[in-house]
Image (spheres, coloured by chain):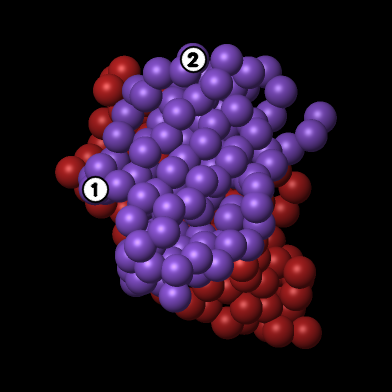
Chain colours: A red, B purple
Amino acid sequence: KQEVTQIPAALSVPEGENLVLNCSFTDSAIYNLQWFRQDPGKGLTSLLLIQSSQREQTSGRLNASLDKSSGRSTLYIAASQPGDSATYLCAVRGEGETSGSRLTFGEGTQLTVNP
Amino acid sequence: KAGVTQTPRYLIKTRGQQVTLSCSPISGHRSVSWYQQTPGQGLQFLFEYFSETQRNKGNFPGRFSGRQFSNSRSEMNVSTLELGDSALYLCASSLVGFSEQYFGPGTRLTVT
Protein backbone atom coordinates (compact mmCIF):
# COMPACT_ATOMS: atom_id res chain seq x y z
CA LYS A 1 0.00 0.00 0.00
CA GLN A 2 1.41 3.37 -1.08
CA GLU A 3 2.20 5.82 1.71
CA VAL A 4 3.19 9.44 1.15
CA THR A 5 4.98 11.51 3.78
CA GLN A 6 5.67 15.23 3.72
CA ILE A 7 8.27 16.97 5.81
CA PRO A 8 8.10 19.40 7.50
CA ALA A 9 4.45 19.51 8.60
CA ALA A 10 4.69 23.27 9.05
CA LEU A 11 7.16 25.92 8.01
CA SER A 12 7.38 29.63 8.76
CA VAL A 13 9.84 31.80 6.82
CA PRO A 14 10.47 35.50 6.24
CA GLU A 15 9.56 36.98 2.88
CA GLY A 16 12.21 36.59 0.18
CA GLU A 17 13.64 33.33 1.46
CA ASN A 18 14.15 30.33 -0.82
CA LEU A 19 12.68 27.14 0.60
CA VAL A 20 12.34 23.40 -0.05
CA LEU A 21 9.40 21.15 0.73
CA ASN A 22 9.95 17.42 0.85
CA CYS A 23 7.78 14.50 -0.19
CA SER A 24 8.59 10.79 0.06
CA PHE A 25 6.64 7.75 -1.09
CA THR A 26 7.06 4.09 -0.22
CA ASP A 27 6.25 2.41 -3.56
CA SER A 28 8.42 3.58 -6.46
CA ALA A 29 6.01 2.13 -9.04
CA ILE A 30 4.39 5.47 -9.76
CA TYR A 31 3.05 6.86 -13.02
CA ASN A 32 3.36 10.51 -12.06
CA LEU A 33 3.53 12.90 -9.11
CA GLN A 34 1.57 16.11 -8.71
CA TRP A 35 2.09 19.07 -6.38
CA PHE A 36 -0.91 21.10 -5.26
CA ARG A 37 -1.54 24.11 -3.05
CA GLN A 38 -4.62 24.52 -0.92
CA ASP A 39 -5.79 27.76 0.66
CA PRO A 40 -7.88 27.45 3.86
CA GLY A 41 -11.32 26.01 3.17
CA LYS A 42 -10.72 25.92 -0.58
CA GLY A 43 -10.13 23.32 -3.24
CA LEU A 44 -6.75 22.22 -4.59
CA THR A 45 -4.81 24.16 -7.21
CA SER A 46 -2.47 22.11 -9.37
CA LEU A 47 1.07 23.51 -9.36
CA LEU A 48 3.23 20.98 -11.19
CA LEU A 49 2.89 17.51 -12.66
CA ILE A 50 5.98 15.33 -13.09
CA GLN A 51 5.80 12.16 -15.14
CA SER A 52 7.76 9.19 -13.81
CA SER A 53 10.23 9.49 -16.72
CA GLN A 54 11.02 13.14 -15.89
CA ARG A 55 13.52 14.48 -13.38
CA GLU A 56 12.07 17.94 -12.86
CA GLN A 57 9.47 20.50 -13.87
CA THR A 58 9.53 24.26 -13.54
CA SER A 59 6.80 26.90 -13.44
CA GLY A 60 7.78 30.45 -12.60
CA ARG A 61 9.33 30.50 -9.12
CA LEU A 62 8.50 26.84 -8.56
CA ASN A 63 10.70 23.89 -9.38
CA ALA A 64 9.81 20.30 -8.58
CA SER A 65 12.21 17.38 -8.82
CA LEU A 66 11.56 13.65 -8.79
CA ASP A 67 13.85 10.79 -7.87
CA LYS A 68 11.62 7.81 -8.51
CA SER A 69 14.11 5.14 -7.48
CA SER A 70 14.62 6.64 -4.04
CA GLY A 71 10.95 7.58 -3.64
CA ARG A 72 11.49 11.30 -3.20
CA SER A 73 10.32 14.59 -4.61
CA THR A 74 11.10 18.15 -3.63
CA LEU A 75 9.30 21.41 -4.33
CA TYR A 76 11.60 24.42 -4.43
CA ILE A 77 10.04 27.87 -4.03
CA ALA A 78 12.30 30.79 -4.89
CA ALA A 79 11.99 34.26 -3.39
CA SER A 80 8.95 33.42 -1.28
CA GLN A 81 6.11 35.94 -0.94
CA PRO A 82 3.27 36.29 1.61
CA GLY A 83 0.87 35.17 -1.13
CA ASP A 84 2.64 31.79 -1.14
CA SER A 85 1.21 31.07 2.31
CA ALA A 86 -0.91 27.94 1.94
CA THR A 87 -0.80 24.19 2.49
CA TYR A 88 1.25 22.34 -0.12
CA LEU A 89 0.24 18.78 -0.93
CA CYS A 90 2.12 16.09 -2.78
CA ALA A 91 0.20 13.26 -4.49
CA VAL A 92 1.28 10.19 -6.45
CA ARG A 93 -0.55 8.06 -8.98
CA GLY A 94 0.37 4.39 -9.22
CA GLU A 95 1.25 2.49 -12.38
CA GLY A 96 -1.16 0.20 -14.14
CA GLU A 97 -4.73 0.37 -15.30
CA THR A 98 -6.08 -0.64 -11.90
CA SER A 99 -4.79 2.62 -10.42
CA GLY A 100 -6.94 4.70 -12.74
CA SER A 101 -6.75 8.30 -11.64
CA ARG A 102 -6.49 7.47 -7.93
CA LEU A 103 -4.12 9.83 -6.15
CA THR A 104 -2.50 9.05 -2.82
CA PHE A 105 -1.86 12.23 -0.88
CA GLY A 106 0.59 13.26 1.80
CA GLU A 107 -0.59 15.16 4.86
CA GLY A 108 0.76 18.43 3.48
CA THR A 109 3.17 21.15 4.56
CA GLN A 110 1.57 24.30 5.97
CA LEU A 111 3.68 27.23 4.78
CA THR A 112 3.56 30.72 6.28
CA VAL A 113 5.57 33.50 4.65
CA ASN A 114 5.89 36.50 6.94
CA PRO A 115 6.14 40.04 5.48
CA LYS B 1 -12.32 27.28 -20.25
CA ALA B 2 -14.47 26.89 -17.14
CA GLY B 3 -13.01 24.91 -14.26
CA VAL B 4 -14.52 22.10 -12.23
CA THR B 5 -17.70 23.18 -10.50
CA GLN B 6 -19.34 21.61 -7.48
CA THR B 7 -22.78 22.20 -6.02
CA PRO B 8 -23.84 22.95 -3.44
CA ARG B 9 -20.85 24.63 -1.80
CA TYR B 10 -22.16 24.23 1.73
CA LEU B 11 -24.62 21.77 3.20
CA ILE B 12 -25.93 21.07 6.69
CA LYS B 13 -27.70 17.76 7.27
CA THR B 14 -28.98 15.80 10.22
CA ARG B 15 -27.66 12.39 11.20
CA GLY B 16 -29.59 9.63 9.41
CA GLN B 17 -30.48 11.75 6.37
CA GLN B 18 -29.05 11.27 2.92
CA VAL B 19 -27.28 13.77 0.66
CA THR B 20 -26.39 14.13 -3.01
CA LEU B 21 -23.45 16.20 -4.21
CA SER B 22 -22.87 17.22 -7.80
CA CYS B 23 -19.74 17.77 -9.86
CA SER B 24 -19.38 19.17 -13.37
CA PRO B 25 -15.95 18.44 -14.88
CA ILE B 26 -13.96 20.60 -17.24
CA SER B 27 -15.40 20.37 -20.75
CA GLY B 28 -13.95 17.37 -22.57
CA HIS B 29 -12.74 15.61 -19.43
CA ARG B 30 -14.03 12.08 -19.10
CA SER B 31 -12.62 11.02 -15.74
CA VAL B 32 -14.16 12.25 -12.49
CA SER B 33 -12.83 11.31 -9.07
CA TRP B 34 -14.15 12.07 -5.60
CA TYR B 35 -12.16 12.63 -2.41
CA GLN B 36 -13.04 13.20 1.22
CA GLN B 37 -10.90 15.59 3.25
CA THR B 38 -10.99 15.67 7.04
CA PRO B 39 -8.52 17.12 9.57
CA GLY B 40 -7.82 13.68 11.02
CA GLN B 41 -7.57 11.53 7.88
CA GLY B 42 -6.42 14.03 5.29
CA LEU B 43 -7.44 13.47 1.67
CA GLN B 44 -8.86 10.04 0.96
CA PHE B 45 -9.96 8.63 -2.39
CA LEU B 46 -13.62 7.66 -2.64
CA PHE B 47 -14.12 6.52 -6.24
CA GLU B 48 -13.46 7.29 -9.88
CA TYR B 49 -15.82 7.27 -12.83
CA PHE B 50 -14.76 7.08 -16.46
CA SER B 51 -17.22 6.96 -19.35
CA GLU B 52 -20.13 6.32 -16.95
CA THR B 53 -18.40 3.32 -15.33
CA GLN B 54 -16.91 3.12 -11.88
CA ARG B 55 -13.28 2.27 -12.53
CA ASN B 56 -11.83 2.48 -9.07
CA LYS B 57 -13.12 2.51 -5.51
CA GLY B 58 -11.55 3.49 -2.22
CA ASN B 59 -12.04 1.92 1.17
CA PHE B 60 -15.35 3.48 2.17
CA PRO B 61 -18.60 1.78 3.30
CA GLY B 62 -21.41 1.09 0.86
CA ARG B 63 -23.29 4.16 2.15
CA PHE B 64 -21.08 6.12 -0.22
CA SER B 65 -22.06 5.72 -3.85
CA GLY B 66 -21.79 7.64 -7.07
CA ARG B 67 -22.63 7.74 -10.71
CA GLN B 68 -21.62 9.50 -13.89
CA PHE B 69 -23.87 10.69 -16.66
CA SER B 70 -23.28 10.65 -20.41
CA ASN B 71 -22.14 14.31 -20.31
CA SER B 72 -19.47 13.30 -17.73
CA ARG B 73 -21.19 15.13 -14.88
CA SER B 74 -21.05 13.10 -11.70
CA GLU B 75 -22.99 12.82 -8.49
CA MET B 76 -22.10 11.20 -5.23
CA ASN B 77 -24.62 10.11 -2.63
CA VAL B 78 -24.18 9.40 1.04
CA SER B 79 -27.02 7.61 2.77
CA THR B 80 -27.73 7.32 6.50
CA LEU B 81 -25.39 10.16 7.37
CA GLU B 82 -23.14 9.88 10.41
CA LEU B 83 -21.40 12.65 12.36
CA GLY B 84 -18.08 11.37 11.02
CA ASP B 85 -19.18 12.12 7.45
CA SER B 86 -18.68 15.83 8.11
CA ALA B 87 -15.93 16.79 5.71
CA LEU B 88 -14.92 18.73 2.62
CA TYR B 89 -15.83 16.64 -0.43
CA LEU B 90 -13.67 17.36 -3.44
CA CYS B 91 -14.21 16.39 -7.02
CA ALA B 92 -11.42 16.21 -9.58
CA SER B 93 -11.53 15.81 -13.33
CA SER B 94 -8.95 14.80 -15.90
CA LEU B 95 -8.88 14.26 -19.63
CA VAL B 96 -8.21 10.58 -19.17
CA GLY B 97 -7.30 8.74 -16.00
CA PHE B 98 -3.56 9.28 -16.18
CA SER B 99 -3.42 12.95 -17.04
CA GLU B 100 -3.20 16.00 -14.80
CA GLN B 101 -6.07 16.32 -12.35
CA TYR B 102 -7.98 19.52 -11.68
CA PHE B 103 -9.98 19.99 -8.52
CA GLY B 104 -13.19 21.85 -7.83
CA PRO B 105 -13.78 24.16 -4.85
CA GLY B 106 -15.41 21.40 -2.82
CA THR B 107 -18.66 20.92 -0.93
CA ARG B 108 -18.46 21.46 2.82
CA LEU B 109 -20.84 18.95 4.46
CA THR B 110 -21.71 19.33 8.12
CA VAL B 111 -23.70 16.57 9.82
CA THR B 112 -25.38 17.50 13.11
Query: How many neighbours does mark 1 have within 10 angstroms: few (below 14), some (14-19), or many (20 or more)?
Result: few
User: Marks 1 and 2: which is nearer the front?
Assistant: 1
What is the number of the mark on residue A3?
none
Farthest residue to the left: give it.
A1
Q: Is residue A89 left or right of residue B80?
A: right
Residues at marks 1 and 2, common chain? yes
Instruction: Using the numbered discs, state the Cα–Cα distance from disc 1 to disc 2 in whole angstroms.
Output: 23 Å
> In the image, residue A37 lies at what x, y percent?
60, 57
What is the number of the mark on residue B51?
2
Q: Secondary structure at mark 2?
A: loop
User: What residue is rendered at 36% in x and 50% in y?
Assistant: B79
> In the image, residue B58 lies at what x, y percent?
29, 41
Query: How many neighbours does mark 2 have within 10 angstroms: few (below 14), some (14-19), or many (20 or more)?
Result: some
Task: Name the kind of residue labelled 1 in the image.
Answer: Pro
Determine whether B90 is above or below B28 in the image: below
Q: Chain of mark 2?
A: B
Residue that badge 1 annotates: B61
User: What residue is rendered at 65% in x and 48% in y?
Assistant: B7
B42 vs B18, nearest the viewer: B18
> In the image, residue A18 lies at what x, y percent?
64, 68
Q: Secondary structure at mark 1?
A: loop
Q: Is residue A74 left or right of residue B58?
A: right
Query: Which is nearer the N-term, disc 1 or disc 2?
Result: 2
Residue B67 visible, this angle: yes
Task: Name the kind of residue labelled 2 in the image.
Answer: Ser
User: What residue is rendered at 65% in x and 34% in y?
Assistant: B24
A55 vs A25, nearest the viewer: A25
* The N terminus of chain A - image quarter: top left
